[in-house]
Amino acid sequence: MKKAFFSLGWTTLVLFVAFLLWARQSPQGAFWSLDEGGKYIYLQSIWQSGQVNTPLIYPARALDPNLERVPLYFYILRDHQIHSWWPIALPLVSLPFYKAFGWLGLFLLPAAAGALTAWLSGILAQKLSGSVRVGWLAMLLTGLATPVAFYATRFWEHTLSTAGVLGALWGMLDADEHRRARSAVLAGLCGSLAVFFRPDAAFLLIGFGLVLLVRRPRLAIYTALSAVLASLPWMALNLWTAGHPFGPTFGKLVEADAFSGWQKAGLKLLAYALFNPPRADAFIFPRWALWTASLSLLAGVVLAFFPRLRWLSLTAFGGVIGVCGWVALQPTWYQAVHGAVLAAPQVLFGLYYLLRKPAWKHSAFPAMLAASLLVYGAVYLWRAWVGAGGLQWGPRYLLSFYPLLVIAALLELQALRQAENRRLYSGALALFVVASLIGLSFSIRGLLTARQLTEWYARGKEVLLNLDAPLVLEWQGYVMDVPDLYLSGKVVTIPALPEPRQQWETFLRGQGYDHYYSGTLLTVDNAPLEVIAERLKEHPSGVVITRVDLTGEP
């Protein structure tokens, strides 16, 4: 085992450097997602105030004393102060790195956690397979051919939570196999960290823990106690800063309508979650493609329960993989990918591993994977909405399942090879390779898409920051994509309606302004990139600016 730890180390280092270098090349001050910008604004608020328990700074408050024109898409208004909508963990732990390394410091932890996620995938695969080669493949596939590659380059906490989940899984498996109390305690510590960064990780970890409780009750209690004790400090911190032990939005999400996605979409919700919902930022599946992928997937799953029909199941999954490949090769440059299977179709092969009876006798891994899928799946159906996750490249709420299913898929291929069923193994391997290449192509496409959009956002920033008077925008999200606009104190957002604009102009006259600017944004409507590129031929900055004179009579 120690040999595997170090034999995978160099590849892990290469992944970390690659993730960090790619993130470093992104334009400074521009983010792909408004979530990233919101966390950055909170980080700046901590830095400037010197306090963790701080509302968000609002430099434009002189232009908006009643907080009616706040240029943020998500925020919490409490006691006439603006508070962050997002979990505090990532901005808080990233602040020292930002102070030390500037813009690059924002991406150190996500990149390191992405590489750590790949490494832990390799360690787990090697542990379960007894093969360093299988471990190395698991690491490469997780780090390059799943959405882990994308999120490792963003200022987001998803890779940090996923690394914690994998650490917890390793600890529980080791505790189960060797009856080691220290591994059970380590699992609790890792699980606590995962939930600190992403509270929804708790539901996945509950699945692991239930299996450990059935198999090793005493060790499961050690894990639970360790997790609770490790969580008390950050729960107290959340309660102090956000008013809820699990963060500012946890209570609001629990209070939201149950099964809202199911009520709106019915069975289509499953198809949307596995492939793509009909959102403008994602590639909208034609009806034939969605039906083909969905029915092929259903057929492949049903047929998988009959070992003698495995060839038919693989053929059906081939139809799913074919549709995913067709989407990956589309000439239109869509801005997002939502589908869990679409983003990395090689995870389909993990199903076969779960149906292999000898695997359940060899390790607790298949039981833990199945239990986590059931628990998290039930919660997802309960709370999810159509397009859950918003702008994303691969379903970020489900990111932790990708390394688990990649490991399961490789273990299944190893079992097929050892069974000496050469024809079945060759067919499955060929499909798996094609599916993995599709996953890799989506990773590359996502990285290029985010790079292009942030470059366009940065163009507009340079123009807007040089204006000599207040600026009005209609879309709050752009101000979060380019948070320097928010921090400049010159930007507010007002709907394009006569009455709010007249009130704003009256207020500005009272403050002594003789003009202001109104901006129309050309890069924020989730149109395909080629459409935006055409607009920018006429307006290279991506912004149309209108000077509004206030010297006339109101």
Image (spheres, grey):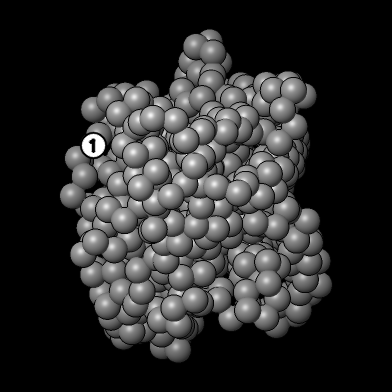
| Mark count | 1
Locate residue 425, reporting x and y percent.
71, 39
- x and y percentages locating residue 336 in the rendered image: 58, 35
Above or below — where is 99 with respect to 363?
below
Residue 341 picture location, percent across and down? 54, 36
Query: Relative to 159, is 387 on the left or the right?
Result: left
Query: Pointer 1: residues within 10 angstroms few (<14), some, or many (20+)?
Result: some
395 relative to 82 in the view: left or right: right
User: Which residue type carries mark 1?
Assistant: Phe
User: In the depicted view, which residue is nearer to us: 315 or 121?
Assistant: 121
Which type of secondary structure does the marked residue at label 1 adopt?
A: loop
On screen, residue 461 versus residue 206, left or right, reads right
Residue at left 50%, top 18%?
A: 290
Q: Which residue is mark 1?
A: 259
* Viewport quadrant of the C terminus: top left
Residue visible at 58% across and 81% down?
96
